Image (spheres, rainbow, N blue to C red):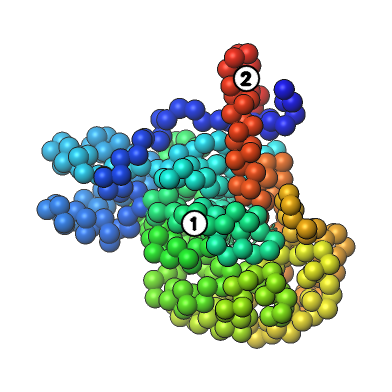
Amino acid sequence: MNTATIAASTTIVTSTTIATSATPEKVNLLGMTRAQMEQFFLDIGEKKFRAQQVLKWIHHAGVIDIAEMSNLGKALREKLARIAEVRPPEIVSQHDSADGTRKWAIRVDGGGLVEAVLIPDRERATLCVSSQVGCSLDCSFCSTGKQGFMKDLSAAEIIGQVWLAIQSYDAFQSGKGRVVTNVVMMGMGEPLLNFDNVVSAMNLMMEDLAYGISKRRVTLSTSGVVPALDKLAEVSEASLAISLHAPNDALRNELVPINRKYPIARLLESSRNYIDAQRDTKRVVTVEYTLIAGVNDQPEHARELAALLADFPCKINLIPFNPFPQSPYRRPSGNAVSRFWQVLVDAGYIVTVRTTRGDDIDAACGQLVGQVVDRTRRSERYRNAAEQNQVTEAG
Ligand code: SAH
Ligand code: SF4
C-alpha cells in the first residue's frame, strides 16, 4: 500500500452520529428560514415564537435531536418529532491541509457528493459552499462543469455545510468563537440555477437567530445567469461576485458558454442594478478572472479588461488556473500573473490574486470533487486495510 498517497490527517467518518438515515416523509427543519419556520408552526397549530426557539437550538446550540430541545415542552417535542426532523447531510471524509484548510466530502440525498472547504486566514475563516451536485454550464476550465449536472441541493443541504463545518470543530458547545466568519457560494454548482434554496440558505447565514454573518461577508458567485440575477435584489442583500474570465464576448463565449445567451454587457448591467438596489451605497462587485496560460493572460487582455470595467464599481480577483486531469489548460507563470496584475493596478483597480490554499488536499477552485470519488475510494481502501492491520492514521 502506498501510504504516501494518504494525506497525513485524513479522517474518514465512519460513524453516523451526526447523520441520521433518510426519512423523506418528515419535514427537515434545518433549511427553513425564520419566516418559513414561523409559518410551519402556525400551520401545525402552534405559536410562531416556537420558530425562534428551534432556530437557536439548531444553529446556535448545534442541537439536532428534537428530544433535547428542552424549552419546547414534552408534548410539543413529541408532536414535532413525529412530523419533523433536523437532518444535516452526511460527512464522508474530512481532509486537513498543512496550511490549515479543511475540506469535507459530503453525501447528499440521492447519493451525490459535494465538497465544502474552510479556509482560515488570520482573523477570518471563509467557508466555500456548494449549491449543486455537478453543474450544467460546462465552463471549459472547470472540473465541476465536466461532470455535468446531477442535482440541486436542498436549502438544508446548503446550510448544512455551514452547520457541519462548525460541528466538526466542536464549536457549537465550546464557545470557541466564530469558526466561520465568511461564506462564499463558490463550491460546486451555479447558485443562481438553484435560486430558491440558495436564497433561503443565504438568508439563514445572515439571520441573527441562525449564523448572524454580515451581508457583506456572504458572497454569491455567478457565471452570469442574468434573468435570475435580475430577480436577486428583491430577495437578497448578499455580496456579489461575477465570473468574467474574459474581456470580450468572443473569448468569453469559449470559456463560459452561458455568455452566448447573456453576453458581457447584459451581465455587467444586471450586476450594477443589483448593487444599486442595495441599501448601503459603498458596495462593489467582485470580478473573478481565472488566468489561463496563453488563453486570457496576456497584457492586451489586461488592457482590454481595464477598458471594459472603466466606471464599473468593482474590485478584481485574479485566480491562477488550477489544473485538473484531462484539462488542456495550464496555470500561468508567476511573472505572467504579476504582469497582468500590474496593468490593472496601473489603471487604478483594486486587484487581489487568490493564493492557492489546500493544494495538498485538492481544495482549490475548480478541483472540487473531481477527484473525490477516487480519493474516497482510495481512502476507503486505506480504511479497510487499516482496520485489518490495526494501523492508526496519523494526525
Ligand atoms: N458557478 C459559480 C460558482 C462556482 S465556481 C461561478 O461560476 O461563479 C467558483 C469560481 O471558481 C468561479 O469564478 C469559477 O470560474 C472558478 N473556477 C472554476 N474552475 C476553476 C479552475 N480550474 N481554476 C481556477 N478557477 C476556477
Ligand atoms: Fe458551473 Fe461555475 Fe464551473 Fe462554470 S465555473 S461550470 S458555472 S461551477
In the image, taking residue 312 as reference, residue 339 lies left or right, namely right
Residue 259's quadrant in the figure?
Answer: bottom right
Q: Say which mark, if any, is on residue 332.
A: none
Dot 1 falls on a residue whose secondary structure is loop
Ligand 2 is in which quadrant of the figure?
Answer: bottom right
Task: Tell me which label, 2 or 1, sits earlier in the chain.
Answer: 1
Q: Quadrant of the C terminus?
A: top right
Q: In terms of depth relative to the viewer, which is nearer, 339 or 90?
A: 90
Q: In terms of depth relative to the viewer, which is nearer, 182 or 385?
A: 385
Task: Kindly identify the residue that appears in the image at 57 percent across and 83 percent down.
Answer: 266
Task: Kindly identify the residue that appears in the image at 62 percent across and 19 percent down.
Answer: 386
Residue 298's quadrant in the figure?
Answer: bottom right
Residue 321's quadrant in the figure?
Answer: bottom right
Q: Is residue 106 above or below residue 267?
A: above
Q: Amino acid at mark 2?
A: Ala
Q: Say which mark, if any, is on residue 385.
A: 2
Q: Is mark 1 within 8 Å of ligand 1?
A: yes
Q: Amino acid at mark 1?
A: Ser
Q: Which residue is mark 1?
A: 131
Rendering coords of residue 359 (x, y %): 72, 45
Rendering coords of residue 33 (x, y %): 33, 58
Q: CA distance from mark 2 to mark 1?
A: 34 Å
Q: Is residue 64 above or below residue 367?
A: above
The outermost residue toward the right is 335
In the image, taking residue 45 as reference, residue 120 lies left or right, namely right
Dot 2 falls on a residue whose secondary structure is helix
In this orientation, does residue 274 appear? yes
Task: Kindly identify the residue that appears in the image at 49 percent across and 46 percent down.
Answer: 112
Rendering coords of residue 83 (x, y %): 21, 44
